[in-house]
Amino acid sequence: MMLSKIFNLNDPGWGKKPQNDDGSREPKRPQQDPNSPPDLDQVWSDVEKKFKALFGGGGNRGGAPRGPGQGGSKPNMQMSPKFIRHGIIFALIVGILLWLASGFFIIREGQVGVITQFGQYKRTVMPGFQWHIPSPVERVERVNIANVRAFSVGYRDSSRNKVLAEALMLTEDENIVDLQFDVQYRIKAGIADVENGNEMGKALSPAASYLFATVDPDESVRQAAETAMREVVGKESMNNILYESRTQAAQDVMRLMQTILDRYNTGIEVITVAIQNVQPPEQVQAAFEDAIKAGQDNERQKNEGQAYASRVIPEAHGHAARMLQSAEGYRAQIVGEAIGEAERFKQIATEYVAAPEITRERMYIETMGDIYSNTSKIMLDTADQQNPLMFMPLDSILNRSADNSTARTTPAAPRTQSENSSFESSASATSTNVSNTATATDARSRELSRDRESSARR
């Protein structure tokens, strides 16, 4: 309203030449063409005078107005109530616009904005340029969901700075272990409101749950971690938690922690649970190390026994296979020889039926030839030298067979020169006896041949 009044072109005084204080007009200027644009100097002068008239400019600030002879001006114009009302409305509009503009805000990447209205949760907004009803109606609180938080249980800063009240835990077999572990967590991402089962009775986003569902969410995570670890360790034996199931125990603790935190609607996500150190208490650590060494020795001996068995058993199988093959060969040999002997016996039996005397004589000769060929003999000539007597030294034969069996097991001692000479003389005597025996055998064979021929003629 005020601006329209200032720049109202329909004002009767707009564009007229101002008068002096004494009522006379200023000197005329050359007239302008009505169709030409107004003079800028004249327009600016008119605007300036209207501002002075509205805000009391140009008046006598000292008191009474001055007369024409004193160079005074007209009395100051008073501001009307309408102008004051318009000014107040304008100021209110500007203030409201500025107040509404203060509701714009920016949420950075990795953050979400939780908006409350008169202290009550209203909504959660994503990163970017956002707006809310300005304070004191609504307020925004920025929550960092990308920041990873971490804490330690059982120690502080280093493994030497132990907290025994947190580190000592009881196992299933009623032993105590000193366990230290780390936990990493963060606020869950997302702005979707999830039904809340607590007293608030309103669905909350994860960030709002982190702010409003629990008094101290970080301490709640620590207590949940210690509770979950004690429960998992209490279900495992000491050997399992020390050597075998450490990784599995960490995974079980992480799952149990997440279940507890979701039950209380904390809006927290567990990232990792890492067991840093687990050992027996210091008071029994020396004895426990001895037990560990004994167990290691036991395992080493088991491994050595298994290696020996792996080496010996195949050798035994191979030896057994060789023995079986040798037995099969021996059986085949004996069976073959037996079959051959049976066939030969059948042939001999056939010949024996045809000529029993001759066959019997031939068998006798062959048998004696086999015996004499493998036995030392001594031939003794009688006085008439017609029927030589053959003597077989049975005692020496038995002793020689015993010596041969002993020689197979023990190496023969070197012979002396006298023994060599006696051996050579006995060998020559034996060869002489053998030749004599062969001569006698030939003579007897000739006699038998003559008997066969005579019997055949008959």
Image (cartoon, helix red, strand yellow):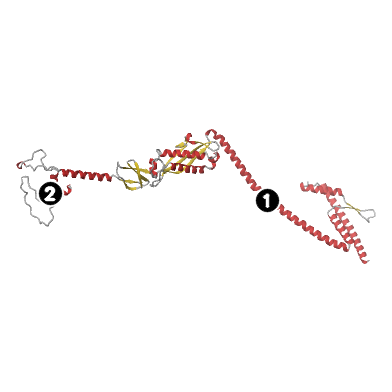
Above or below residue 440? Residue 178 is: above
Q: Secondary structure at mark 1?
A: helix
Identify the residue under disc 2. Answer: 46
- The percent position of residue 147, horizontal first and vertical second, equals 40, 43
Q: Which residue is mark 1?
A: 317
Query: What residue lies at 81% left-to-right and 59% top-to-bottom?
Result: 342
x, y percent for residue 260: 45, 41
Q: How many marks?
A: 2
> Is residue 32 or residue 315 the one in the foreground?
32
Q: Amino acid at mark 1?
A: His
Camera-side mark, 1 or 2:
2
Q: Residues within 10 Å of mark 1 (few under 14, many from 20)?
A: few
Residue 417, image x and y in percent? Answer: 81, 47
What residue is at 47 percent from the left and 44 percent from the top? 255
Along the viewing direction, whichever of 393 and 81 lies nearer the viewer: 81
Q: Would you say 327 lies left or right of 280 here?
A: right
Placement of the C terminus among the 4 image quadrants: bottom right
Residue shown at the point (44%, 38%) measured from the top left: 222
Q: Is residue 385 above or below residue 202?
A: below
SS of the residue under disc 2: helix
Q: Residue furthest left?
A: 69
- Most foreground residue, 139 or 147: 139
Please, which residue is most extreme toward the bottom here?
Answer: 457
Is residue 444 visible in the rendered image? The answer is: yes
Asked which quadrant contains residue 265, the reply is top left
